Amino acid sequence: MLKGGLFSRANGINNWEQVVGFSGPDRDAEGSRAFVWTAATGMVDLGTLGGAYAQAYGINDAGFITGTAQTADGWIGATHAFLYQIVIGDGFSRPMIDLGTLGGNSSHGLAINAQNHVVGYSTINTTDSRVHAFFYGDGRMVDLGSLSGKHVKADKSAALAINSTDQVVGYTYLPSNEGPIQVGFLYNMSAAGARTGMQDLNGLIGSAAKQYRILAATGINDLGEIVATAVDGAGTVHAVLLTPSFGEVRQ
């Protein structure tokens, strides 16, 4: 744990056994600080964006880290997604890069790929609590939207993972008479491939959609295989693996 910490959590690791997470006085406490751990250095505090609080969630093999950190000015308690690069020999002295928001005062970077592209979620305004999934690359944050149509109550989404070909997965909501329904999504951001908008994964799993509803996609590898949580007709939640086939995702 970091100095003064009583709790720590590891959230990510790369192929060089560099580990990132956060440590603080209590579980998920606002006093937490982002860290990187290596066998040579132990746990090192990555600093913040000027405030007192930070958490790290993902790291790639080049040593680029993402997470969220409190800013020094603006809204009280504002936290922004950040990018941080480990450079061996610099004593972890580089400052975090503030990735900004889609609007409002907060954003969280949850995953990063080999191209240093970051995904997560961000507030979209300062008037309500709606958040949208984002993709950050080439110096700008892109709003991935939601599947809510014009229904404000269902207008939420979050990106949880990205692979090296910029396929993004996460969850969003659909409107219904009973209220918003959570579903997993796939979004292809690849400039080289067939770029798509946000797709409901339940429309891509064929006959399996009669048995399960995909609630959230939590990971995707470079083969396009997706791990997700799904609920069956009895309300039981399952871990599932989705494998792409002929341009569609099959269970």
Image (cartoon, rainbow, N blue to C red):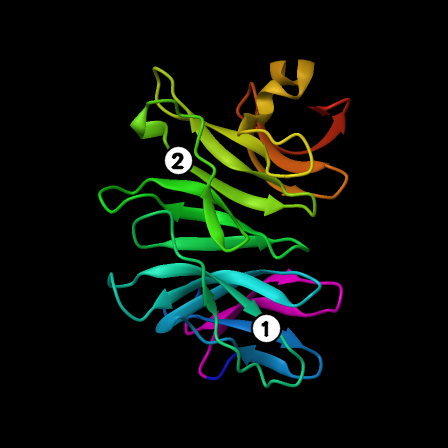
Of 239 and 181, nearer the camera is 181
Q: Is residue 46 left or right of residue 102?
A: right
- Horizontal side of 64 relative to 46 (left or right) equals right
Checking the image for residue 36, the label placed there is: 1
- Asked if residue 188 is among those painted magenta in the image, a careful observer would answer no
Reply above or below: 35 against 217: below
Residue 23 forms part of the magenta stretch: yes
Q: Which residue is mark 2?
A: 156
**Where residue 112 sits: x, y (%)?**
60, 54
Side of 162 relative to 56 (left or right): right
Question: Is residue 29 in sight in this rendering?
Answer: no
In magenta, the rendered stretch is 4-26
Amino acid residing under circle 2 = Lys
What x and y, as percent, mark residue 118?
55, 53
Q: Nearer the viewer, residue 64 or 231?
A: 64
* 208 versus 12 height, above or below: above
Location of the C terminus (image quadrant): top right
